[in-house]
């Protein structure tokens, strides 16, 4: 391939990659939210339970960085253990922020995100994971669930009240409300 053909092919390849990774509602220059992920076999896991990153970078054998477009929903789970067993369970459902949103500082999330749900401890994390599994059993992608549902779940966890389920009717109402001008 000649240099002129190569120099013409490179911008086309970049444009094609940008078109695949950025939705039409967001400009290609929209700032991405970077989420750190890690995996050290018997001791530490920091992984995504759901979310569709625009890009993922493999930093080394143990660490990755997932990048999300503004408005994207994601769930990150943290699990830590020592010689005696599990010492920490943490689950966070968050929404990548647009440039005008107020964000919360979250370790490993740059520049920050809108935190919708934060669960700590074995029982709380398992309860939220069960809710996520039941949502996916309905055929609804967890990234499409109403942010208000995640906030409600967080408030119910904090108040030690029964957790509400997410139904197809509730999802249809959320989609209908989102379609209104």
Image (cartoon, rainbow, N blue to C red):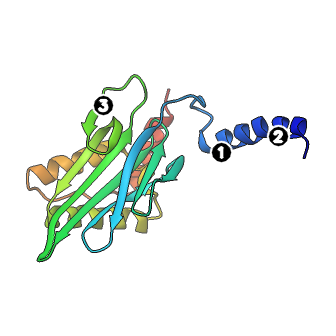
32 lies left or right of 135: right
- For this orientation, the residue located farthest to the bottom is 84
Relative to 39, residue 15 above or below = above
Quadrant in the rendering for residue 19: top right
Within the image, what quadrant is residue 133 found in? bottom left
Residue where numbered disc 2 is placed: 9
Callout 2 environment at 10 Å: few (<14), some (14 to 19), or many (20+)?
Answer: few
- Rendering coords of residue 109 (x, y %): 33, 42
State the image coordinates of residue 96 (x, y, percent, origin top left): 40, 39
> Where 35 sits versus 99, above or below?
below
Q: CA distance from mark 3 to mark 1?
A: 26 Å
- Which residue matches tag 1? 20
> Is residue 173 in view from this perspective?
no
Residue drawn 42% across the image and 25% down it: 99
Please state which of the two labelled residues, at mark 2 or mark 3, is closer to the viewer. 2
**Distance CA(mark 2)–CA(mark 3):** 39 Å
Give the residue at x 47% y 64%: 139
Task: Read off the residue under disc 3.
Answer: 103
């Amino acid at each position: 391939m000649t240099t002129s053909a190569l120099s013409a092919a490179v911008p086309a390849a970049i444009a094609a990659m940008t078109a695949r990774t950025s939705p039409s509602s967001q400009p290609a220059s929209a700032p991405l939210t970077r989420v750190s992920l890690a995996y050290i076999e018997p001791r530490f896991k920091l992984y995504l339970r759901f979310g569709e990153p625009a890009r993922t970078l493999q930093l080394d054998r143990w660490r990755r960085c997932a990048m999300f477009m503004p408005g994207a929903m994601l769930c990150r789970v943290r699990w830590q253990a020592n010689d005696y067993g599990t010492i920490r369970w943490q689950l966070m459902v968050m929404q990548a922020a647009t440039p005008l949103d107020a964000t919360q500082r979250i370790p490993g999330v740059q520049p920050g995100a809108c935190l919708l749900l934060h669960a700590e401890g074995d029982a709380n994390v398992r309860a939220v994971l069960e809710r996520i599994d039941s949502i996916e059993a309905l055929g609804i992608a967890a990234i499409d669930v109403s942010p208000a549902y995640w906030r409600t779940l967080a408030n119910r966890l904090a108040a030690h009240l029964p957790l509400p389920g997410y139904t197809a009717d509730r999802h249809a109402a959320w989609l209908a409300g989102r379609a209104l001008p």
